[in-house]
Image: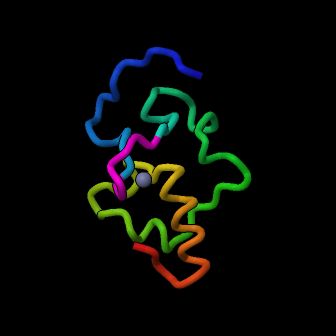
């Protein structure tokens, strides 16, 4: 789905708080949350992942799919992969 959207009204919410890349969050694109990739059944946000998000970004900016999968693997192995 590549519709032309206006930029998000709130700066920063369209970017991953961990790596700074676009998180492709449906909410930041003005779409319903259930359209977001993070609603896929194989995507799981753990408390450990959320704890990595800076306090001022928590609950506003989504972690991107890359970081979620990277963290999911890293957290399984040895806690926290840099
Ligand atoms: Zn990221």
User: Would you say 22 lies left or right of 78 here?
Assistant: left
Quadrant assignment, res 11: top left
Task: Compare residues 1 and 29 and report the one nearer the observer.
Answer: 1
Residue at (49%, 74%) from the top-left corner? Answer: 48
* Residue that extends furthest to the top in the rendered view of this protein: 4
In the displayed structure, 35 sits above or below 61; it is: above
Number of marks in the rendered image: 0
* Residue that extends furthest to the bottom in the rendered view of this protein: 78
In the displayed structure, 18 sits above or below 75; it is: above
Residue at (57%, 38%) from the top-left corner? Answer: 33
Residue 34: percent from left, percent from top: 63, 38
* Residue that extends furthest to the right in the rendered view of this protein: 41
Residue at (32%, 49%) from the top-left corner? Answer: 20
The C terminus appears in which quarter of the rendering?
Answer: bottom left
User: Would you say 12 lies left or right of 16 here?
Assistant: left
Residue at (37%, 45%) from the top-left corner? Answer: 21
Quadrant assignment, res 35: top right
Residue 28: percent from left, percent from top: 42, 34
Region of the chain picked out in magenta, as a range? 17-23
Residue 78: percent from left, percent from top: 53, 84
The N terminus appears in which quarter of the rendering?
Answer: top right
* 18 drawn magenta: yes
Task: Compare residues 63 and 73 and report the one nearer the observer.
Answer: 73
* 36 drawn magenta: no
Residue 73: percent from left, percent from top: 59, 70
Report the coloring of the rendering.
rainbow
User: Would you say 16 lies left or right of 56 here?
Assistant: right
Main SS type for the magenta part? Answer: loop
């Amino acid at each position: 789905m590549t519709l032309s959207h206006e930029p998000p009204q709130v700066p920063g919410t369209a970017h991953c708080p961990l790596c700074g890349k676009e998180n492709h969050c449906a909410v930041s694109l003005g779409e319903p949350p259930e359209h977001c990739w993070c609603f896929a059944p194989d995507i799981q946000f753990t408390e450990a992942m959320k704890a990595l998000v800076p306090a001022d970004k928590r609950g506003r900016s989504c972690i991107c799919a890359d970081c979620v999968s990277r963290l999911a693997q890293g957290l399984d192995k040895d806690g926290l992969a840099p």
